[in-house]
Image (cartoon, rainbow, N blue to C red):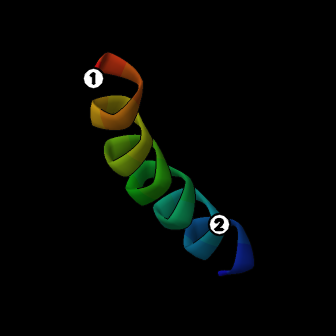
Amino acid sequence: MIQIKCSHILIFTIQYLLPLLIF
């Protein structure tokens, strides 16, 4: 269960960081 939560956090961070890197 911890791994699933970590993966979700990673996905959210990537989705938020990708736009910042593009700009």
In the image, what residue type sits under mark 2?
A: Cys
Looking at the picture, tell me which residue is in the foreground, 1 or 5. 5
Question: Which quadrant: the C terminus?
Answer: top left
Q: Is residue 21 above or below residue 16?
A: above
Relative image position of residue 19 (x, y in whole percent): 27, 33
Q: Which residue is mark 1?
A: 23
Helix, strand or loop at mark 2: helix
Total of numbered circles in the picture?
Answer: 2
| Quarter residue 6 falls in | bottom right
At horizontal 72% and vertical 79% (from top left) the residue drawn is: 2
Relative image position of residue 22 (x, y in whole percent): 30, 18
* Apparent side of residue 19 relative to residue 7 in the rendered image (left or right): left
Relative image position of residue 5 (x, y in whole percent): 58, 75
* Apparent side of residue 19 relative to residue 14 in the rendered image (left or right): left
Q: Residue furthest top?
A: 22
At horizontal 36% and vertical 35% (from top left) the residue drawn is: 20
* Apparent side of residue 9 relative to residue 20 in the rendered image (left or right): right
At horizontal 70% and vertical 66% (from top left) the residue drawn is: 3
Q: Is residue 16 above or below residue 2?
A: above
Q: Earlier in the sequence, mark 1 or mark 2?
A: 2
In the image, what residue type sits under mark 1?
A: Phe
Q: Which residue is mark 2?
A: 6
Numbered mark located on residue 1 in the image: none
Looking at the picture, tell me which residue is in the foreground, 10 or 3. 10
* Apparent side of residue 9 relative to residue 23 in the rendered image (left or right): right
